[in-house]
Image: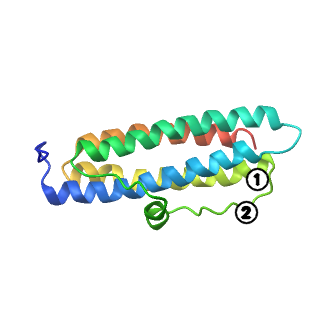
Amino acid sequence: MKTNIGINKANSLAVATELSKLLADEFVLYTKTRNAHWNIEGPDFHTMHLFFESQYDALDDIMDGVAERMRSIGHYAPATLKAFLELTHLSERSSSKNDSAGFIKELLADHENIIIFIRENINRFAADYNDAGTSDYVTGLMEQHEKMAWMLRSHL
């Protein structure tokens, strides 16, 4: 059934296109955070193992929310690794050693990239595409990433 929520087809497609990129970024960041959780080594192993778990749990909820937002405006979410790698702004490669400082720096940079991407789209969603709902949604999402980035940054 056609979605009739007061956003024209072209605008909802434009929003969904940007949300697809965001979902891809979230998935890549989730995977990199899982990598940190699984492969962390060093004297702070236990603490960081649990810390990274709390971060990937939060990212799992974020991914689900972005995909559901896409569905609520009438579009399907990308859901393949190939699609995510084609859409993401992030690099899937990890260049760090398996220590907490290396993982934290890389994950922090990815969170900051996502924050900037979201910030660039908040006003566009509301003003250009008449989608205040998505604008509001991604504002809250940006705040979650800012808090996660702060938590990472505080370990450095």
Q: Which residue is mark 2?
A: 95
The Cα–Cα distance between marks 2 and 1, rounded to whole angstroms, is 8 Å
Labelled disc at residue 61? none
In front: 143, or 66? 66
- Residue 70 in percent (x, y) is at 30, 47
Q: Residue at x 80, y 33 (%)?
A: 46
Instruction: Determine whether, in the image, residue 109 is placed left or right of residue 17.
Output: right
Q: Quadrant of the N terminus?
A: top left
Amino acid type of the residue tagged 2 in the rendering:
Ser
Residue at the spot x=76%, y=44% of the render? 156
> Taking 73 as reference, is 28 above or below it?
below
**Percent position (x, y) of residue 90?**
55, 61
Q: Secondary structure at mark 1?
A: helix
Q: Which residue is mark 1?
A: 102
* Lower sequence index among marks 2 and 1: 2
Give the amino acid at mark 1. Gly
Q: In what element is the residue under mark 2?
A: loop
Left or right of 129 in this view: 68: right
Nearest the viewer among 46 and 128 is 46
Q: Badge 2: few (under 14), some or many (20 or more) residues near its Cα, within 10 Å?
A: few
Examine the image and state in which quarter residue 150 appears: top right
* Coordinates of residue 36 in the picture (x, y in percent): 70, 47
Q: Nearer the viewer, residue 36 or 148?
A: 36
Image-quadrant location for residue 133: top left
Q: Decide if residue 72 is on the left or right side of residue 94.
A: left
